[in-house]
Amino acid sequence: MSTVWHQARRAARMNPSIIREILKVTEKPGVLSMAGGLPSADTFPVEALKSACDAVLSKNAKEALQYAASEGFAPLREWVAAKVAELGIRASADQVLITNGSQQGLDLVGKVLCDAGAPVAVETPTYLGALQAFTPYEPIFTSLASDGEGVRPEAFARLPHDAPGTRFAYLLPNYQNPTGRVMSAARREAVVAAARQAGVPIVEDNPYGDLWFDEPPPPALSSLWPEGSLYLGSFSKVLTPGFRLGYIVAPSELYPKLLQAKQAADLHTPGFNQRVVHEVIKNGFLDQHVPSIRARYKANRDAMAAALQQHLPAGCEWQSPQGGMFFWIRLPEGFDAMALLESAVQAGIAYVPGAAFYAHQPDPRTLRLSFVTLTPDLITEGVAILGRVLKDALVGVAEPTP
């Protein structure tokens, strides 16, 4: 008798990341990729990490290579608590949980807060990885009306209030993935007031907040409502994603369950990685390192903004981001970014179609471009290719149907 594997109901809700699938395509020679949300490898502080590895193995090898506390390396948690204080978030190290990237933080949030059939509110559009993390726990997504500054405050009044009630609103206020938009200080205050009025907690995800170009973003949403907010951060964009280090700053009443979920998932985040990162950052290294990343990314942003203006056909819409890694493009009426992707890759350029970033009613005319992994010259070349693909397709869109 053959073995039959019966998969859990949640397994049917798991879907591959379109971004990861597209990245496979971009490995073809000659394709300029603006698809992945990858930080520039040229920003990785290799020498500092080498020195830190040597220092950790020289001074604390046995401890670094042993099992570790589920909460995380205590000095690193203390560093995080001091870091978020700069954003206006008052929290102790006892509220900090070190995770395997902020993506694991999203999974733990889903595991602890989501029930089958319970509403979860998300921006329009929102981070695809969050939708992937929450979906297996079977929530019902509610899309919050959004504009160029993010979620609109009045959207909270329309959220479901009947039992079980909206569990949380997932928000990215700083240089959002995928749109690059940032909330103003006034919008943040209005959003938090609306969320409090509606009784909907906030899960604030901030992987890009340090990547500002001209001025830092306003204080964190979590600083305005500490007891009603959970904050996610990451070291991936300011050091290296390969160490897979992120963190949650949670209200004290929620922390124990997140810790238990973490223990069940992987016992702890690798202690060696945590100690190496702490060795690098403990004496202010990021104060010198991150400005160099900002300068590089700003130059790339400017190159892409100029290239889009020069090469994209009339009718395309975008905003120049004030930080982060992405441009969000809306194509003219009649275009479908997914349908055009194959032609674009054949021509030598890859992007991410925007439809995957919507919980409901995807806009097929949208696409995301990353500007941080290519040089300014290659950005200009890639956008020129994209412009030619769109102009060729525009002829087909304009032709009457026989």
Image (tube, grey):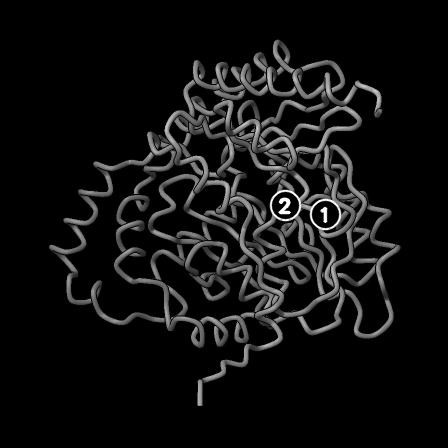
Q: Are marks 1 and 2 in contact (CB under 8 Å)?
A: yes
Nearer the camera: disc 1 or disc 2: 1
Check disc 2 and report the residue beneath it: 172
In the rendered structure, which amino acid carries the disc numbered 1? Glu
The quadrant of the picture occupied by the C terminus is top right
Q: Residue reaching furthest left? A: 58
In the image, is 393 to the left or to the right of 22?
Answer: right
Residue at image coords 44%, 40%: 237
Element marked by disc 2: loop
Check disc 1 and report the residue beneath it: 123
Q: Which label sits on residue 343?
A: none
- x and y percentages locating residue 53 in the rendered image: 19, 49
Element marked by disc 1: loop
The quadrant of the picture occupied by the N terminus is bottom left
Q: Earlier in the sequence, mark 1 or mark 2?
A: 1
Residue at image coords 57%, 20%: 386
In the rendered structure, which amino acid carries the disc numbered 2? Leu
